Amino acid sequence: MFVSKRFASILLILCGAFIFAQTDEIKTISVMKGDSVTLHTGVSDINRDIQILWLFGPENPDTLIAEIYKLKIFIHGSYEGLKDRLQMDPQTGSLVIGNITTSHSGLYTAQIMTDTVTIYKRFSVIVYAPVPLPVIESSSLVSECQISDRGFSCEDCAVKCSAENGPGVSLSWYKGRERLNQTSSPELNINLSLPLEIKERHSDVYHCVAANPISNKTTQFSFQQHCPQYTDSIPFCGCTEAVIRLVISALVGVAAVAILVYDIRSGRVDASPQTNVRVK
Ligand SMILES: *[C@@H]1O[C@H](CO)[C@@H](O)[C@H](O)[C@H]1NC(C)=O
Ligand SMILES: *[C@@H]1O[C@H](CO)[C@@H](O)[C@H](O)[C@H]1NC(C)=O
Ligand SMILES: *[C@@H]1O[C@H](CO)[C@@H](O)[C@H](O)[C@H]1NC(C)=O
Ligand SMILES: *[C@@H]1O[C@H](CO)[C@@H](O)[C@H](O)[C@H]1NC(C)=O
């Protein structure tokens, strides 16, 4: 049997790929919704003797979506919405999916056939939506310095960060570059929520990050905005100022009462004119 040099080299490439495929490796590709992705066959130059079938399925690659045979390309319309987005590279048989949507997440397999060998290239494509911007809310509205037998104590500023959940989404609190806490959930129809008690008042070093494997969004914590009850001039747990204020207002109150009593005693003030009772 006569085998051309070129065909032999392709066979060689395919055999190499065959050994590779034997390991049953599935290449995972993460892609952002709306982007374009190329699934490579690894074949460098297709000739008439090579047939490539592309199969797809959300769980099993069981639907024929594209094919090249005797150098002719066929795109099949069997999977909803996918047909208009598919292109095949006529040189390599690689599959290009344009403007991909989350419903095109799943398993793609290229079945590459010559007269003598069949090899498979498997891909797991995961399409992620961009993560939503996390929202920071104050989770306790009233906060004040309280007197106890140990002295004054102030509540921390309690906030929570939330974001809509989605595939691969996690929500984290950071203090500078240090991650303080993180949450995620396999249940997708919920909002993720992560509480935090903020202790340092002097700088806005905290931020909340929503992330998935391809994108992230950050919301910066701000005392002014998220804990307005703390932005009054009382420094954090520097309750001495609160004490001074309390003492001053108490002194002012005592002084006012003293002056009033003095005035009443000296008969200069009509204490309750409505009832016509006069102080003698
Ligand atoms: C991408 O597909 C969506 C529908 O899934 C469509 O609304 C949008 O216009 C498409 N974008 C482009 C650039 O074709
Ligand atoms: C992380 O958050 C959970 C609540 O979602 C809380 O129980 C836990 O104490 C937090 N861990 C830290 C280190 O703040
Ligand atoms: C998630 O949060 C959004 C507001 O950010 C709200 O409109 C929606 O109802 C919440 N969903 C759930 C399941 O709590
Ligand atoms: C967020 O994404 C940027 C790139 O856009 C990356 O440099 C950064 O490390 C990511 N941050 C986190 C917390 O994942």
Image: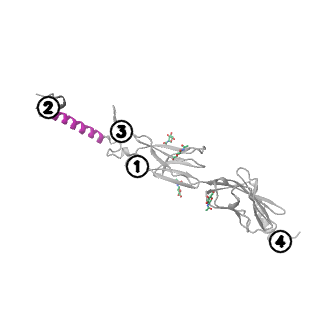
- Disc nearer the start of the sequence (3/4): 4
At which x and y percent is residue 31? Answer: 62, 57
- What whole-number distance in Å separates the C-alpha atoms at marks 2 and 1? 48 Å
Instruction: Determine whether the residue tagged by mark 3 lies in a helix, strand or loop.
Output: loop
- From this view, report whether residue 4 is shown above or below residue 264: below
- What whole-number distance in Å separates the C-alpha atoms at marks 2 and 3? 37 Å
Say which of marks 2 and 3 sits in front. Answer: 2
In the rendering, which numbered label is found on residue 4? 4
Q: Are marks 3 and 1 in contact (CB under 8 Å)?
A: no
Specify the principal SS of the magenta part.
helix
Q: Residues within 10 Å of mark 3 (few under 14, many from 20)?
A: some
Viewer-nearest residue: 271 or 149: 271
Instruction: Determine whether the residue tagged by mark 1 lies in a helix, strand or loop.
Output: helix
Tell whether 225 sits left or right of 13.
left
Q: Residues within 10 Å of mark 1 (few under 14, many from 20)?
A: few
- Disc nearer the start of the sequence (4/1): 4
Q: Which residue is mark 2?
A: 264
Instruction: Identify the amino acid type marked 3.
Output: Glu
Q: From this viewpoint, which residue is outermost toward the right?
A: 1
- Disc nearer the start of the sequence (2/1): 1
